[in-house]
Structures are given as structure tokens and as C-alpha cells.
Amino acid sequence: MIDDLIGTPYVPGGRLPGSGTDCFGLVVACCLRAGHPIPDPFVSADRPMDSREWIAERLGGWQKADGPTPGGIVELHSLEHPAHIGFMLSDTEFLHTTRKTGAIISRIDRAPWKQRVIGWYVYAG
């Protein structure tokens, strides 16, 4: 489901299909592939929205979960602010993208990610 996404370059504001994507665009693509499309505030909102505002609104159609769930979303902080999200592939691995790595699978139960978790979300319909 995601093998073709690994290695996709990080592009601020980028969306797939295209030459690259940011973490929000990657999660939007993964959710679409999983059959749970989510709105992309950067292209579907009536007004511009920054990433912190989008996360703060807690993704319409999704609910907070007690822990990691395959097919769910993990919300992460950077410098004490919500600033990054990833798509959970298993209880311990998530797909995300950064400027340094591009799209990559990382372990959520290890540093530095374990310390940055703000919350978990599952699709509620």
C-alpha cells in the first residue's frame, strides 16, 4: 500500500501525485489509500490554514485513541507545538516525511519520536 511512497522527497506544501510532499500531504495520501479520505486544508479549505491550526481541529471524522493503531494517525510536537503527523503502519512503525529524510518508516517507540507524541487518532467515520 505504501512501498511506492517511501523515499518520496519532502516538499513544503507538496501533494501527491507530484514530485514530493510534506507530512500532511503524505498522511492525506495514505488515508485516501486506506479508504478514509480526510480533507486537505491547504487545498480544500475556504481560507488558508496553517499546520498547527489543522492539527488543533483534530481532523474531522477522527477520534482520539488510547494508543497507536494501524491505519491511524500520530500527532507529534516540535519545540512544544503540534507540528508533525504520521500514518501508523503498525503498533510501532509509522510513515512520515521530513526535510532531511523524505518519506521514511520510523519506530514510534524509540527516540526521538517516542518523546514527541502528542496523541493518537483513529478514523471514526
Image (cartoon, rainbow, N blue to C red):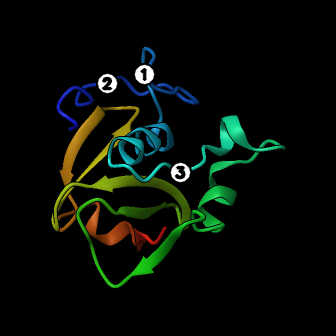
Q: What element carries label 3?
A: loop
Q: Residue furthest top?
A: 19
Residue at figure coordinates x 66%, y 67% from the top left? 57
Residue at figure coordinates x 37%, y 49% from the top left? 35
Spot occupied by residue 105 in the image (x, y as percentages of width and height): 20, 44
Label 2 amino acid?
Answer: Thr
Label 3 amino acid?
Answer: Ile
Residue 90, by quadrant, is bottom left
- The residue wearing badge 2 is 8
Q: Which residue lies furthest to the bottom in this view?
A: 66
- Counting residues from the N terminus, which is met first, the one under dot 1 or under dot 2? 2
- The residue wearing badge 1 is 20
Spatial separation of the CA atoms under disc 1 and disc 2 = 6 Å
- The residue wearing badge 3 is 38
Label 1 amino acid?
Answer: Gly
Spot occupied by residue 61 in the image (x, y as percentages of width and height): 55, 66
Q: Which residue lies furthest to the right in this view?
A: 47
Q: Do the residues labelled 1 and 2 touch (CB within 8 Å)?
A: yes
- Counting residues from the N terminus, which is met first, the one under dot 2 or under dot 3? 2
Q: In this view, does 59 lie to the left or right of 10?
A: right
Spatial separation of the CA atoms under disc 2 and disc 3 = 20 Å
Spatial separation of the CA atoms under disc 1 and disc 3 = 19 Å
Nearest to the observer: residue 101 or residue 120 = 120
Residue at figure coordinates x 36%, y 23% from the top left? 9
- Counting residues from the N terminus, which is met first, the one under dot 1 or under dot 3? 1
Spot occupied by residue 92 in the image (x, y as percentages of width and height): 15, 64
Mark number displayed over residue 96: none
State which quarter of the image contains the N terminus.
top left
- In the rendered view, tell whether residue 106 sits above or below residue 109: above
Q: Residues within 10 Å of mark 2 (few under 14, many from 20)?
A: some
Residue 58, by quadrant, is bottom right
Nearest to the observer: residue 61 or residue 56 = 61
